[in-house]
Image (tube, rainbow, N blue to C red):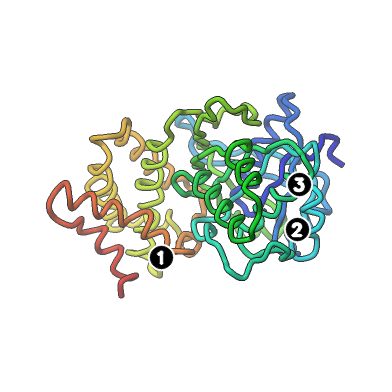
Amino acid sequence: MNPLPETILQFGAGRFLRAFFDRFVQHANEAGQNVGCIVVVQRSADERSDLLNSQPEGYQVLVRGYQDGELIQRRENVRSISRVLLADKQWQDVLALAKSPELRVIVTNATESGYVLDARDQSDSAPPETLPAKLTQVLWSRFQAGAAPLTLLPCELIECNADKLAELIVMQSRAWGLPDDFRAWVRGDCVWLNSLVDCIVTMPEPALAKAEPLLICAEPYHLWALERPGEKKATLFEHPAMRLADDISPFFLRKVRILNGTHTAMVGKFHGKFETVQKLLADRVAARWIRDLMYGEIVPTLAHRIDLVPQFADETFERFRNPFTNHKLADIAKGQAVKVKMRLEPTREEYEKLFGKPPARIVEAMKPLAA
């Protein structure tokens, strides 16, 4: 049993949060910051939830790749998760935890497609379908209990993610006829931090995954850019990956356009031809196409307005070449339509404005979707 209080409510038990945020909480706890532990909410039972609930020793993250020019491998044990609650069976337990005086933070990662409302969600749905509706119920439960405001840390790869999620909750609360003072509390008292997360997280090789079902692989590189909360006091801990800034849009644009945009273009151009990013880049012709796309079409739309863009592109290409990153194009392809709209379409439009012609490789990568 984790001796620290349950201070964090996390929506999502996927690989990324467990290798990123949950590992950072572990680091902070080990450093004596006593951040607390995490209660994870996932929709329904599966092997992952059963294992997380039955293994107090936690799980391991295998960190491997290039760090300061050297190829490294290390294992880190993560014990920051205290339990997993199943939304379809334990929603009342989730709402009860929302009232806890020890709760300080809510963390989410629902992907780009999760920022929606569903008219079928009602104020008494148990649970509601969408993330905004779930959070509306959680925050309403806390508000009714008179508990302290929370810090909300969305980790979805959406620009101004906290602002957009907060607005969806305001919209949901209006649809449910909740009072104005609740909305004032949500927007005025709770702290919403826009953020950008950056770390490539993958599954281990099949033999390792079979032997250790909870094992996750992560590259050494990690960045968590957070918008400064201004005059409000946010509940945060210290970690080397964190970068607090008044404006995180440069971090967002560099990452989404260069790293994620290139990933999305890989799927559009090469899905079905290569299994992984590493196998793709081992092919001389494919690697040249990717390099020309990155440096010839993406970088020129950013370099005139954001610092260190060519350097970030160099770093990204090396991260792609990590021999340990088993990054499957099939995984990257999930939600491809939304990803193309957010990660490639803006670059295509800006390139045409700057150079008076369409970017040939980006257009080619977008063709499979149009077809």
Instruction: Name the quadrant containing residue 12.
Output: bottom right
In the image, what residue type sits under mark 2?
Ser
The location of residue 334, given as percent across then percent down, is: 49, 64
| Nearer-N-terminus badge (1/2) | 2
Above or below, 233 relative to 174: above
Q: Are marks 3 and 1 in contact (CB under 8 Å)?
A: no
| Nearer-N-terminus badge (2/3) | 2
Badge 1 marks a residue whose secondary structure is: helix
Q: Residue at x 75, y 58 (%)?
A: 49
Query: Mark 2 to mark 3: distance in Å?
Result: 30 Å
Above or below, 186 relative to 246: below
Instruction: Name the quadrant containing residue 359.
Output: bottom left
Badge 2 marks a residue whose secondary structure is: helix
Q: Is residue 60 visible?
A: yes
Q: Are marks 1 and 2 in contact (CB under 8 Å)?
A: no
Above or below, 126 relative to 229: below
Q: Is residue 58 visible?
A: no
In the image, what residue type sits under mark 3?
Gln
The label number, if any, that marks residue 354 in the structure image? none
Residue hosting label 1? 337
Q: Residue at x 55, y 46 (%)?
A: 155
Residue hosting label 2? 49
In the image, what residue type sits under mark 1?
Ala
111 or 210: nearer the viewer: 111
The location of residue 180, given as percent across then percent down, is: 62, 47
Q: Residue at x 57, y 55 (%)?
A: 110
Residue hosting label 3? 144
Few, some or many C-alpha atoms within 10 Å of disc 2 (few <14, some 14-19, many ≥20)?
many
Q: Is residue 156 left or right of residue 121?
A: left
Query: Mark 3 to mark 1: distance in Å?
Result: 40 Å
The location of residue 241, given as percent across then percent down, is: 55, 32
